[in-house]
Amino acid sequence: MLPAIFNENLFDNFFNDDFYMPSMFGKNDPLYGKHAKNVMKTDVRETDNSYELDIDLPGFKKEDVSLKLDSGYLTISASKGLEKDEKEKKDGKYIRRERYEGQCSRSFYVGDGVQAKDVNAKFEDGILKVSFRKPHLR
Protein backbone atom coordinates (compact mmCIF):
# COMPACT_ATOMS: atom_id res chain seq x y z
CA MET A 1 0.00 0.00 0.00
CA LEU A 2 1.42 3.36 -0.99
CA PRO A 3 0.76 6.28 1.33
CA ALA A 4 -1.69 8.80 -0.06
CA ILE A 5 0.02 12.06 -0.97
CA PHE A 6 -3.03 14.30 -1.13
CA ASN A 7 -4.83 13.43 2.08
CA GLU A 8 -4.12 14.03 5.75
CA ASN A 9 -2.90 10.50 6.45
CA LEU A 10 0.45 10.45 4.65
CA PHE A 11 2.52 9.74 7.76
CA ASP A 12 -0.14 7.76 9.61
CA ASN A 13 -0.48 5.40 6.66
CA PHE A 14 3.28 5.10 6.31
CA PHE A 15 4.07 4.42 9.97
CA ASN A 16 1.08 2.12 10.51
CA ASP A 17 1.80 -0.06 7.48
CA ASP A 18 3.68 -3.24 8.41
CA PHE A 19 5.27 -3.38 4.96
CA TYR A 20 7.08 -0.07 5.49
CA MET A 21 7.45 -0.06 9.28
CA PRO A 22 7.01 -3.52 10.84
CA SER A 23 5.48 -3.24 14.28
CA MET A 24 7.56 -4.68 17.11
CA PHE A 25 4.80 -4.47 19.69
CA GLY A 26 1.66 -5.26 17.72
CA LYS A 27 -0.83 -2.88 16.21
CA ASN A 28 -1.60 0.24 18.19
CA ASP A 29 -5.17 1.45 18.05
CA PRO A 30 -5.27 5.23 17.90
CA LEU A 31 -7.14 6.95 20.71
CA TYR A 32 -8.09 10.08 18.80
CA GLY A 33 -8.65 11.13 15.22
CA LYS A 34 -10.74 9.61 12.51
CA HIS A 35 -9.27 6.13 12.97
CA ALA A 36 -10.21 5.92 16.66
CA LYS A 37 -12.55 3.14 17.70
CA ASN A 38 -15.37 3.55 20.20
CA VAL A 39 -14.20 7.00 21.21
CA MET A 40 -16.53 9.94 20.99
CA LYS A 41 -15.09 11.95 18.14
CA THR A 42 -15.19 15.60 19.12
CA ASP A 43 -14.71 18.98 17.48
CA VAL A 44 -13.76 21.76 19.92
CA ARG A 45 -14.34 25.32 18.77
CA GLU A 46 -13.39 28.55 20.52
CA THR A 47 -15.33 31.75 19.90
CA ASP A 48 -14.73 35.18 21.42
CA ASN A 49 -17.08 34.43 24.33
CA SER A 50 -17.40 30.67 24.61
CA TYR A 51 -16.20 27.17 23.88
CA GLU A 52 -18.31 24.76 21.82
CA LEU A 53 -18.01 20.99 21.56
CA ASP A 54 -19.66 18.90 18.84
CA ILE A 55 -19.53 15.24 19.84
CA ASP A 56 -20.53 12.40 17.52
CA LEU A 57 -22.74 9.84 19.24
CA PRO A 58 -24.34 7.89 16.38
CA GLY A 59 -26.98 5.40 17.42
CA PHE A 60 -27.42 6.86 20.90
CA LYS A 61 -30.63 8.43 22.18
CA LYS A 62 -30.88 11.54 24.33
CA GLU A 63 -31.67 9.45 27.42
CA ASP A 64 -28.47 7.41 26.86
CA VAL A 65 -26.24 10.47 27.32
CA SER A 66 -25.20 12.24 30.53
CA LEU A 67 -22.98 15.18 31.44
CA LYS A 68 -21.24 15.69 34.77
CA LEU A 69 -19.17 18.65 35.95
CA ASP A 70 -16.77 17.90 38.80
CA SER A 71 -13.59 19.67 39.95
CA GLY A 72 -13.22 21.57 36.69
CA TYR A 73 -13.72 18.51 34.47
CA LEU A 74 -16.73 18.10 32.19
CA THR A 75 -17.37 14.39 31.63
CA ILE A 76 -19.69 13.21 28.88
CA SER A 77 -20.86 9.59 29.13
CA ALA A 78 -23.06 7.49 26.89
CA SER A 79 -24.18 3.89 27.13
CA LYS A 80 -26.46 1.62 25.16
CA GLY A 81 -27.26 -2.03 24.89
CA LEU A 82 -28.75 -4.28 22.28
CA GLU A 83 -30.85 -6.35 24.71
CA LYS A 84 -34.08 -4.99 23.26
CA ASP A 85 -33.13 -6.30 19.81
CA GLU A 86 -32.25 -9.69 21.31
CA LYS A 87 -35.67 -10.06 22.94
CA GLU A 88 -37.53 -9.11 19.77
CA LYS A 89 -35.66 -11.63 17.58
CA LYS A 90 -36.40 -15.07 18.98
CA ASP A 91 -35.84 -17.12 15.82
CA GLY A 92 -32.41 -17.80 14.36
CA LYS A 93 -28.97 -16.92 15.60
CA TYR A 94 -26.47 -14.23 14.83
CA ILE A 95 -23.64 -15.13 12.49
CA ARG A 96 -21.93 -11.76 12.91
CA ARG A 97 -22.57 -8.76 15.17
CA GLU A 98 -20.89 -5.47 14.43
CA ARG A 99 -23.16 -2.86 15.94
CA TYR A 100 -21.75 -1.08 18.96
CA GLU A 101 -22.98 -2.02 22.40
CA GLY A 102 -21.43 -0.65 25.55
CA GLN A 103 -20.43 2.61 27.11
CA CYS A 104 -17.97 5.36 26.42
CA SER A 105 -16.97 8.59 28.09
CA ARG A 106 -14.61 11.50 27.66
CA SER A 107 -13.52 14.20 30.05
CA PHE A 108 -12.47 17.72 29.19
CA TYR A 109 -10.80 20.14 31.57
CA VAL A 110 -12.92 23.30 31.47
CA GLY A 111 -11.57 25.01 34.59
CA ASP A 112 -12.85 25.56 38.08
CA GLY A 113 -14.63 28.76 37.02
CA VAL A 114 -17.25 26.88 34.98
CA GLN A 115 -20.40 25.91 36.88
CA ALA A 116 -23.17 23.51 35.88
CA LYS A 117 -25.56 26.41 35.19
CA ASP A 118 -23.08 27.74 32.60
CA VAL A 119 -23.16 24.56 30.49
CA ASN A 120 -25.72 24.26 27.69
CA ALA A 121 -26.28 20.99 25.83
CA LYS A 122 -28.46 19.94 22.91
CA PHE A 123 -28.67 16.46 21.36
CA GLU A 124 -29.89 16.20 17.79
CA ASP A 125 -29.30 13.74 14.92
CA GLY A 126 -26.64 11.82 16.84
CA ILE A 127 -24.59 14.92 17.65
CA LEU A 128 -24.27 16.34 21.16
CA LYS A 129 -23.64 20.08 21.06
CA VAL A 130 -22.21 21.45 24.31
CA SER A 131 -21.33 25.07 24.92
CA PHE A 132 -20.22 27.14 27.87
CA ARG A 133 -19.19 30.75 28.33
CA LYS A 134 -15.54 31.43 28.99
CA PRO A 135 -15.12 31.65 32.78
CA HIS A 136 -13.54 35.11 32.79
CA LEU A 137 -16.48 36.58 30.83
CA ARG A 138 -19.27 35.74 33.27
Image (spheres, rainbow, N blue to C red):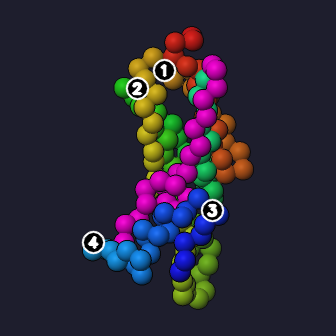
Task: Please name the residue shown 47% across and 70% down the image.
Answer: 14
**Numbered tag placed on residue 25 in the rendering:** 4
Q: Which residues are magenta?
A: 27-49
User: Badge 3 local density, few (<14 within 10 Å), some, or many (20+)?
Assistant: few
User: Which residue is nearer to you in this view: 53 or 87?
Assistant: 53
Q: CA distance from mark 3 to mark 4?
A: 27 Å
Residue 114 highlighted magenta (yes or no): no
Describe the element under mark 1 as helix, strand or loop. loop
User: Which residue is nearer to you in this view: 12 or 132?
Assistant: 12
Residue 39 highlighted magenta (yes or no): yes
Q: Which residue is mark 3?
A: 7
Which mark's residue is nearer the viewer, 4 or 2?
4
Task: Report the amino acid beneath label 1.
Answer: Val
Query: Could you tell which of marks 2 and 3 lies nearer the N-terminus?
Result: 3
Task: Please name the residue shown 60% across and 66% down the image.
Answer: 5
Which mark's residue is nearer the viewer, 2 or 3?
3
User: Badge 1 local density, few (<14 within 10 Å), some, or many (20+)?
Assistant: many
Contact between labelled residues 3 and 1, with CB atoms less than 8 Å apart: no
Query: Could you tell which of marks 1 and 3 lies nearer the N-terminus?
Result: 3
Where does the C terminus fall, quadrant-wise?
Answer: top right
Query: Could you tell which of marks 2 and 1 lies nearer the N-terminus?
Result: 2
Q: Which residue is mark 2?
A: 72
Contact between labelled residues 1 and 2, with CB atoms less than 8 Å apart: yes
Task: Report the amino acid beneath label 4.
Answer: Phe
